[in-house]
Image (cartoon, grey):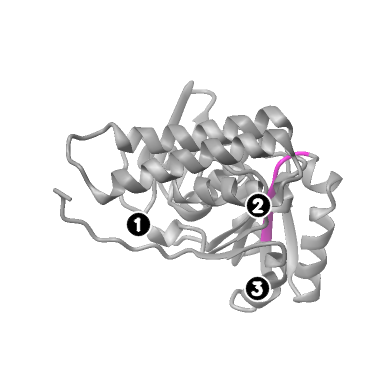
Amino acid sequence: MLLDFTYYNTTKIHFGKNSLEKLGDELSLYGKTVLLVYGKAAIKKNGLYDKVVAILEAAGKKVVELPGVMPNPTYAKMQEGCELVRAHDVSLILAVGGGSVIDCAKGISASAYCEAEPFAKYWLQYRPISNKTVPVASILTMAGTGSEMNGGSVITHEDMEIKAGRIFPPELYPRFSILNPEYTLTVPKYQMISGVFDTMSHLMEQYFCGTDISTTDYLIEALLRSSIDNLRAALKNPDDYEARSNIMWNATMA
């Protein structure tokens, strides 16, 4: 290991078939109003939306919704969320979906109370966070990006025709993330494969970026082997929970 480093990750992971049961306890740590951020129809079709809303209501939360977050979330959609945060004094942003939804939630958190133009300040100029932020949490439905346990946020500014990524500091990491591999069973085959290739690309970016031989390299080799083996198993049997669980955890580790 040729570099000095500080390792610090603030995200609490609840993993497994019963992980959604932890949501109520986590909600007790936050204020009254929750912004529920999600994509289009997937979480309503598979019943997850109803389960999450029922838990939020049982916890006495006021629920404000931002539906329709698209792959490669746009700056305009993110700004819709910022307006909702300010209008309703949101105390927690709960992203339910894949990496794009979680990326959008982090962008909302960073930008809602930014007095400058947020995209220029935080995504183009990479300035430090200097304003109030809102806690973010996630319920993951697709494995691939690792956004559930890091500070990454990729936003597309359509007017400027720029897709920009930003790694935010730990205060914008999800405070907690719920990972139930069963939620990935309804993901289309193509998307499942794409998620694994996303995982592998993240691993290879680090593996080939230097000349040192480090412990991290050996961890990466193991994660690559696991990703390949478990993808093959999931393609053979799409309902293989163990394969799906390994794929999900590999993506988070990557």
The residue shown at (75%, 76%) is 59
Q: Is residue 227 magenta?
A: no
- Which-is-in-front pick, marks 2 and 3? 2
Instruction: Assign the magenta stretch its main secondary structure.
Output: strand
- Which-is-in-front pick, marks 1 and 3? 3
**Residue 80 location (% of width, % of height):** 63, 44
Residue 78 in view (yes/no) = no
Q: Are marks 1 and 2 in contact (CB under 8 Å)?
A: no
Q: Find disc 2 in the rendering and name its residue.
A: 242
The residue shown at (80%, 40%) is 41
Looking at the rendered structure, which numbered label has been put on residue 27?
Answer: 3
The residue shown at (55%, 38%) is 229
Where does the magenta region start and end? 35-40
Secondary structure under tag 1 reads: loop
Q: Which quadrant would residue 8 be assigned to in this image?
A: bottom left
Secondary structure under tag 3 reads: helix
Q: Find disc 1 in the rendering and name its residue.
A: 130
Left or right: 107, with 127 as reference point: right
**Residue 189 location (% of width, % of height):** 71, 31
Q: CA distance from mark 2 to mark 3?
A: 29 Å
Give neighbour class at mark 3: few <14, some 14-19, many 20+ (Cα, 10 Å).
some
Give neighbour class at mark 1: few <14, some 14-19, many 20+ (Cα, 10 Å).
few
Left or right: 254, with 214 as reference point: right
Residue placed farthest to the top in the image? 161
- The amino acid type found where label 3 is placed reads Leu
- Which-is-in-front pick, marks 1 and 2? 2
